[in-house]
Amino acid sequence: MPASIYDFDLPDRHDFEAMGLSIMNRAHSRASRKTRMRRFVAWFGAEPKYLAITWRELAKTGWLRFAGRAPKPEHLLWSFLWLNCYAVEEIHAAQVGVDEKTFREKVWFYVEGIAQLDRNLVS
């Protein structure tokens, strides 16, 4: 991940793609880029570049300072997953390998941050 003027890294679209494919258990898929992106969007509702933009905007607003010692881009992916495929916590928590409380806390932190972004970015 590239260096940052913030206290944490700013992941790019490639980083988000790798994290998302890992969550999807497709990290070593030999599928075409088009197929990988179709699957990624099916899970997260947006292409990796939009997750990178969202992360950068959250960083610019200062929202990520409230995430604790080290904000984790994976948690933003969890939020996009939850927003796109609204299922019960038990299902999503199992998909990402954490307990329900952890999933709920992380997702809601980032969903609230997204909601605070400029209306030009979020509708």
Image (spheres, rainbow, N blue to C red):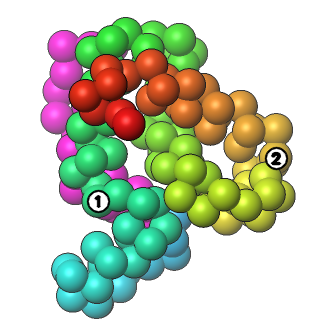
Q: Secondary structure at mark 1?
A: loop
- In this picture, which residue range is highlighted in magenta? 1-22
Q: Which mark is residue 47?
A: 1
In the rendered structure, the answer to whether residue 47 lies left or right of residue 28 reads left
Q: Tell me if mark 1 has few (under 14), some (14-19) or many (20+) residues whose alpha carbon lies within 10 angstroms of its own.
A: some
* Quadrant where the N terminus is found in the figure: top left
Residue 56: image quadrant is top left
Q: Which mark is residue 11?
A: none
Query: Which amino acid type corresponds to the residue marked 1 in the rendered image?
Result: Glu
Give above or below for 75 relative to 20.
above
Query: Which amino acid type corresponds to the residue marked 2 in the rendered image?
Result: Glu
Q: Tell me if mark 2 has few (under 14), some (14-19) or many (20+) residues whose alpha carbon lies within 10 angstroms of its own.
A: some
Q: Which mark is residue 100?
A: 2
In the rendered structure, the answer to whether residue 68 lies left or right of residue 16 reads right
Name the residue: 38% across, 69% down. Answer: 40
Residue 107: image quadrant is top right
- In the image, 12 versus 79, the foreground residue is 79
Report x, y in % for residue 14. 22, 56
